[in-house]
Amino acid sequence: MPAEVSGDRSVTLLNYGHPATVVVRPDGTVHFAAPPRNALPLGLGIRGTDAPRPYETDFTPGERAVLLKDPDPETALQTLRRDLVQHVEGPLHDDAAMLLLRYHRW
């Protein structure tokens, strides 16, 4: 899911069928930045279907944005590891990454 953080305290997202980006506020509350409408996963678009459109959500200092395929981070980590092991048909011989954005004040 592409994401662009701008200087105006927002993040622009483009969602290709993933669950909503999870924005964790400094007080610990969670906001699910859902797209205005769902789209098919990247590569599964069919002619005549609408492509996803960029949308914005607030993203201010001290907040974290978690972009992953499952909104529950623990489940996402387990699922990611299982999928990677299955993909490589054996144990992982390299590292894997998940994206967590954190907005710091400069």
Image (cartoon, helix red, strand yellow):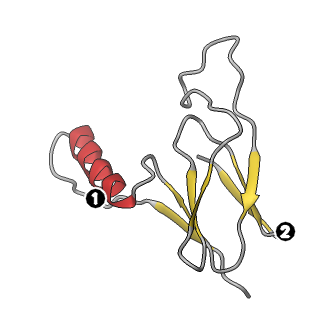
> Helix or strand or loop: what does disc 2 sit on?
loop
Where residue 79 appears, as percent x and y from the top left, is 30, 48
Is residue 2 left or right of 44 when viewed as pictured?
A: right
First reached walking from the N terminus: tag 1 or tag 2 = 2
Q: Which residue is mark 2?
A: 8
Q: Residue at x 16, y 51 (%)?
A: 91
Task: Kindly identify the amino acid type of the residue bearing the numbered disc 2.
Answer: Asp
The reply to whether dot 1 and dot 2 touch (C-beta < 8 Å) is no
**Mark 1 neighbour density, 10 Å: few (under 14) some (14–19) many (20 or more):** few
Q: Which residue is mark 1?
A: 94
Is residue 70 left or right of 88 when viewed as pictured?
A: right
**Mark 2 neighbour density, 10 Å: few (under 14) some (14–19) many (20 or more):** few
- Camera-near label (1 vs 2) is 2
Residue in the foreground of this view, choosing between 43 and 36 = 36
Viewport quadrant of the C terminus: bottom right
Residue in the foreground of this view, choosing between 92 and 33 = 33
